[in-house]
Amino acid sequence: MTLTEKDQEPDTPLLRASATSPLRTGRGITTIAPAVVEKIAGRAATEIDGVGVVAPAGLRKLFSSTPDPDTPADADARVGMERASVAMTISIMYPAPVRSTSSAVRAAVAQRVEQYTGLHVSWVDLTVAQLPTVDPWKPRRRVE
C-alpha cells in the first residue's frame, strides 16, 4: 500500500509548518520553559566585564553562605511561542559606565537567547541594584 501526499502530511493547525518559527515544524512544536531563558540570560549577562549578581545585604547576608562568583544574574522571563522578554537585576562594578555596560548586557542577552533557543527577544529590562566599588565576592583584607 502506498501513501498519497495527503496521507503523509496531516493538515491540522498543530502540525502545519510555520515559516517564521524554527520551533514550529511539520513534526510538532518545541516549547521553551521560562526557566531555560532565565538561565541563558543570567549567564550571558554575567559574561560582560564589570557585571555581576547583586550581593546579599542585611539579614540575608548574615544567613546566607558566600555564593559562587559564577552564579548567573537574577532574571525573570516571559516566553511565548516565538518571542521572549527578560527582566534582570544586576550589579555593575564602579566606575564602569552604566549606560554602555547595560547596552552591552541587553545585546548579549538578546543574542544568546536567540542563538540558543530560536526565540526573538522583544526587550530586556535591567535594574542596576548596586554599584560596588570592590568585588563583593572577594574577601576583604583586615588591617590589624
Image: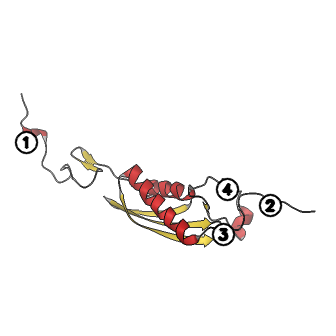
Side (left or right) of 140 relative to 41: right
Q: Residue at x 56, y 60 (%)?
A: 73
Q: Residue at x 87, y 61 (%)?
A: 142
- Give, as a three-letter code, the residue at label 3: Pro
Mark 1 vs mark 4, CA separation in Å: 57 Å
Find the residue positioned furthest to the top: 1
Q: Which residue is mark 4?
A: 67
- Which of the two discs, 1 and 4, labels the residue nearer the N terminus? 1
Q: Which residue is mark 3?
A: 95
Mark 4 neighbour density, 10 Å: few (under 14) some (14–19) many (20 or more): few
Tell me where residue 107 appears, x and y as whole percent.
45, 61
Mark 1 vs mark 2, CA separation in Å: 71 Å
Q: Helix, strand, or loop for circle 4?
A: loop
Residue situated in front as seen by the camera: 96 or 21: 96
Residue 7, located in which quarter of the rendered image? top left
Q: Residue at x 65, y 70 (%)?
A: 131
Q: Is residue 48 visible?
A: yes
Instruction: Specify the label residue 19 is tagged with.
Output: none
- Which of the two discs, 1 and 2, labels the residue nearer the N terminus? 1
| Depicted 126 relative to depicted 110: above or below | below
- Which of the two discs, 3 and 1, labels the residue nearer the N terminus? 1
Q: Which residue is mark 1?
A: 6
Q: Helix, strand, or loop for circle 3?
A: loop
Tell me where residue 98 appears, x and y as whole percent.
57, 71
The answer to whether mark 3 and mark 4 are in CB contact below 8 A is no
Mark 3 vs mark 1, CA separation in Å: 64 Å
Q: Which residue is mark 2?
A: 140
Residue 121, located in which quarter of the rendered image? bottom left
The answer to whether mark 2 and mark 3 are in CB contact below 8 A is no
- Give, as a three-letter code, the residue at label 2: Arg
Q: Residue at x 80, y 61 (%)?
A: 140
